[in-house]
Each structure stands twice: as structure tokens, then as C-alpha cells.
Amino acid sequence: MKSTKKNMNIGAAFFFIFFSLLFFVLIVRFVTIQYTGEAEGRVLSAKAAQLYLRQEKIPSKRGTIYDHNGEAIAEDTASYTLVAILDEKLTTDPEHPRHVVDPQMTASKLAKELKMSESEIFSRLTKEGRKQVEFGPVGKDLSLSVKKKIDELKLPGISFIKDSKRFYPNGIFASHLIGYAQKDEKTSEIVGKTGLEKSYDKLLKGKNGTIKYEGDIWDYVLPNTSKQVVEPVNGNDIYLTLDKKIQTFLEDAMNKVDEQYQPKRIMAIVADPKTGKILAMGQRPTYHPATRVGIDKSWHNEIIETSYEPGSTMKIFSLAAAIEKKVFNPNDKYPSGRYYVDNKSKPIKDHNGGSGWGSITYLEGVQRSSNVAFAYLLEKMGTDAWREYMDRFKFGTPTGIDLPNEVSGNILYDWPIEKVTSVFGQGTTVTALQMVQAMTAIANDGKMMKPYVVEKVVNPNDGTVKDTKPEVAGQPISKDTAKAVRSILETVLTSEHGTGARYKIEGYKVAGKTGTAQIPDPKGGYLVGYNNYIFSFLGLAPADDPKLIMYVAVEQPNLKEDENGYLENGSVPVSMIFNPVMKSSLQYLNIHPEEIPETKRASLPDFLNMNTQAAMDHIKEKSLIPILLGDGDKITGQSSPLGATLLEGEKIILKTNGNLTLPDMSGWSKRDVLNAAQLANLNVNMVGDGFVTKQNIKPNSPIREGDHLVVNFETPKQTIEREKAEKNKADEEDKPLD
């Protein structure tokens, strides 16, 4: 008994000592933590703060791309992603639920605003175990107007995540030059993929900011806490040399040719020869930068990334070299028809099958685009001299324009036949932009200007501006030579033998050269067939003091037969682009024609503050069509500048001092829509090509500055096909049932 009691005392003593030591350790640990504020090397206050610390991104704004006049071409716009909260735990006040309470009712109402069936929406809203759901592509990139409509439904648990996307208000508009940008799936940032959006991505891209705060489990800010904000740095804005009006002229003309002739490719450039500024640039096939529809047909910029044989437009520069070397006498004669390079090569033939036109002058040879004439001129100046002038004109060298993936072309100059064919544009390859750069030397009294498309870069954060200055790329010829070449090229259009008669523009002196380039056959040699050429024209106007250069190339158009069964000349589709674009651009730039037929043209005064009715009467007297924006009694703006030369039947849009209203735009061209949108200060998005068939703002309804105008266009062919389909559908519906 005593032994048992003794053992119990020892055990009790042991436990007493053990727990005393444990209690002592806990007391020491508690005092240490209390005194130092740390545990296991971690600051406990910081650890506690992390439980409540929230950090969110403040997105920066990607820079806007503007045209020469400050019209937005590519910009960020708000977009919204629709989300539904399904977690009932987020509702703390039953009278103000934060989750979807009635999935059936919610699905029914959302189906009216989304392109998604009610059953599919209901299925998403009733997924088990999900706290939040989205609605796939249908629920993303929603516009502000759609968001407002859904907000007005006041559906519990329906919310939005605000984001941004790239917006291209003009639709298909210099698409390969501008390129496109889209959201990267990994980083959720907008990244430039092609064109200027890609080459200037670092400048356009801003730096996101952050906001830090202490919040509860629902991310609401805790009371009496401060916020730490790092402001975002917005991307730089880029102003281009492009002119929206001239680019619109070009797009419309290319659309017409593309629809009528379905060529394999079209390339066109309009440039200012005095500075090297690119005023318009386009190609077909093309694509819509927002949807990328059509990009699979041609995703790269043909004008700088594709080299090809230019054909007879190269004769402009071999003529300049011959004049500079003083071996061109316009009155000297040569035997046209055939030219034999050596015993091994096939003879060089003129384009009339080699029969020629007998012994003719070199001037007539240029006018007739005789290959043999230029082969003899090469003899006179020497092959080394011509090779030197190709270098002077920068053929075989990239222009250095600020666009990605520019190629250099290739000068073939090893064999005697290659040296001769290069003088009239065969064998050697160039890019369309190289042709334009070389032509600036002809237009600009010998000074060749480097082409560029970015006029300035503006930092919106500090206001700094980086301007691009015109740069002389070289002076391959003298002023006198340039003037002589222009004079001769003018006769290519005016002479009875000239190949360029189709490119004459009433009231303006145009100088230029036609080209009909063969297309290499992958199997060897060249393609055969009347359509299998690259038809082109490189011209300038006015010839005496050029203000514009324009180059157009149309590859493999489907030429039409006339009533006698003869195919059209390849210059027809080319002139359908060159003539209207050059003429409209000259008029737009207020370059007055030398002759103005009174019955076909008119000019208008400044209508500012004039009585509305008086202005309309004046416009009607000039056989023009007045269009009113608003119901005021005084004019506050007009679409045509003071003194502009206008064609009969052209629309003149007048803005009044009254409440702004939008007219019915049915049948309008893109040019007229742009004029109206610019006057009313609307954000316009144009969909399709051709003429207006639909507008989102009802005719004669009130508008405010900054409203978004969406206009749908259709070509005449599309309209006919649509109406035919609608008629067939109506006929089917009217048929009696069996």
C-alpha cells in the first residue's frame, strides 16, 4: 500500500514538473512574440495585413492612331464581359440579393438582348457547384449600349467586367498598313499583331497602374483604411501622314475594280512627292481589322513585302538615266521591232509581236513603249552606267519605311540578256514602294524623298512630341533631267501614239508611264494569256509642278469582252482607280484645274452664318444637292471647303445652329457619310462596301456630338443578290401546302 502511494507521488511530481516546464515555455514564447512581434522569422502584423490586402490593376490606355488631320483610325474603346453570380453566400441582405435568384426569369430576359437561346442561358445559370459563370464569346466585347439595356433589366446577380478592345471606326481602311491589335490570352493585354500596330507596339502600349487597399472577403474597402495608387502610364498617340479623305477615295475605287474584275491582286499608293508622305495606301484582297474577315486571303502588306517585275513603268528611270548621260535625242531614229542581244539569246521584241513600226524616233519609241528603243538606249549609255543609276534610284535596297518585313527586291544583272531586259522592267524585281520613292526624284526636280507614314508621335502623359522630318534619300538626276522626263511622260498621254491616253484627266496635266509586266510561271518562263499580266500606271500631276504621285498595279484581272468580242485593254481597270482618285484628291487639295467647264463644275462660297434657306437655294442653283444637319435657321458648318471645285450632283452637307438631326443616308457613298459624321462630330463605324443600306440611327431623329453611328454598306451586286434571296423566300412562304 505504501509502495503504491509512493509511486503515485512520484508520478504526480513528474507531471507537475512537466507541465510547469511546458507552461514556462509557453509564457516565454508568448512574451517573446509580444515583445518582438515576430514568429518563426515572420512579422505577424505584416502577415495579418496580407489577409486583408487587396491589389487591383488600373489598365493603361493604348495609344490612338490618327490620320494627318487628327481623325481616329485605331483607338481603344470600352467593352464589357457579362457575368452571373451564382454563389448564394454573397447575399447578406435578402432584400438586395447579389446572386441570381430566379434563373428562369433571368434567362428569359437575357435571351432578348444576347445572341443566345433561353435554354442555353438557363443551363449556364443552373450549373451545380459554380460560384460565377460567363457566357462565352456571346457575352464578351459587349458595347456600352448593350450593357445599358441589360442594366435596365435590374436582374439580381447579373454584373459586368469592364475591359477595353481595339476599335477601328472606318472598318476596311488601309488595313494592311494600319494592321490590327488584339488581346493576348495569357497576359490579357492588347498586343499589335501586324502593320503599324505591330511595329509601334512598344510606343502604343502603356504601362498599367495599381491600386492597393485593405478589404473584406467581398473585396469591399475596410473603413478607416488608406489606398495606395500608382497611376497608369498611357501609350503614345501616333499621327500618320495618311489623309482620311484620300484613303477613302482609294478604298472606294479599289472596291469597284475588285468587284467588277476580280483580280488576283491590286496595289495602290498616293504620295506627296515634295516630302515623301504617304497619303493613301491600299491593296486587295484586304481584311477587316476588327473581325479579321478576309485576312486568310492576304495577311501581309503586298506593297512592301512583295517584289515583282514592274514592266514598262521602269522605263521612266532608264529614260532619266539616258537623258542624264546625254545620250537621248528625241529626234534620232532607230529600227523598231526586234533587237538581238547576242547569238545565244532570243531577240527582244516590241509589244506588237516584233513587227515594230519601222524606223521611228526615240520620242515615238517612248510614247509607244517600245522595248527595242530602250535596248538601243542601253547601248548608248552603257550597261555599267545603267547599273549605277539603278543604285542611285535605290532599286535593290529597302526604302527603310517604318513598317515591318520590307523586302529589297532583286536586280538580276549577270548575263547580257538580263542587263537588257532590266532596262524595260523584266527580270529585275522591285516593290511598289520603291517605284514611288524613285518617282519622287522625277516629280521633285531630282531630289528623291524617303517615303514615310508616321508624321509624329505624341506622349499624352507629358505632352512631348517627336516629329518626323522629310528626308532626302538621294539625288539620282538633275533638275533639268527631271523636268525633261516629265515633259516626255506627258506626251505618253497626249500623243496620238501614246499608250497612256486613258489616264488623261480633264483640266489637269498628267505625266506618267503605263506598264504591262509578264508574270513568271513557276514551271519556267512566263504565264501566257491576255489576262495574265500585271497592268500598272505610275503617274504624277500636275505635270509642271507635281503635287501628287500615284501608282496603281492590277494583277490578272478578268477583262471583259465588248459587243464585237474583243477583250478590254488592261489599262481599263487600272484607270478606274487612278483617274477618279487622282482627280478627287487634286480637287480635295484645292489644286485648281487649268480648265473648268462651267456646265460640269461649281464652286461654293463660305456659308458660315448664312440663312439656311438662302444657302440651300444657292447650292441648288449650282446643280448640287443640299443636305441639312439640324433644324436651325443659320449655317454653322459645311462639308466642302471654301473655293473647292465640285461636280454636278455632289452632296453638300450643311450643319445648322438648331437641334442636330441625322438625315436618311440610303444610297450614300462612304465619302458622304464621313463628311456628315465629321460635321456632326459622330463616332462612325462603317461595315461593308458600296453604298448605304442601313443605319443604326433612324433618319431625322435627334443626335448629339459623340454619338456612335453604325452604317452598313452594300455593293449593287450584293443588293441585287439579297433582294433576289428575299423574293425567293417570300415566294416559298406563299406557296400552298400539300
Image (spheres, rainbow, N blue to C red):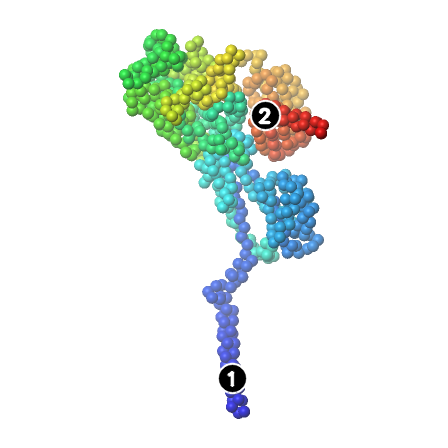
Looking at the image, the residue that sits furthest to the bottom is 2
Judge whether residue 84 can be spotted in this image. Answer: yes
Q: Residues within 10 Å of mark 1 (few under 14, many from 20)?
A: few
Residue 409 is situated, as x and y percent measured from the top left of the image, at 37, 28
Q: Select label 1 or label 2 by which is in front.
A: 2
Judge whether residue 691 can be spotted in this image. Answer: no
Query: In the image, what residue type sits under mark 1?
Result: Gly
Q: Nearer the viewer, residue 568 or 528?
A: 528
Query: In the image, what residue type sits under mark 2?
Result: Gln
Residue pictured at 61% horizontal, 23% vertical: 720
Q: Nearer the viewer, residue 686 or 594?
A: 686
- The image quarter containing residue 307 is top left
Name the mark on residue 718.
2
Residue 57 is situated, as x and y percent measured from the top left of the image, at 53, 48
In the rendered image, the vertical position of residue 214 relative to residue 648, given as above or below = below
Residue 324 is situated, as x and y percent measured from the top left of the image, at 33, 18
Residue 186 is situated, as x and y percent measured from the top left of the image, at 49, 46
In the rendered image, the vertical position of residue 193 relative to residue 339, given as above or below = below
Q: Which residue is mark 1?
A: 11
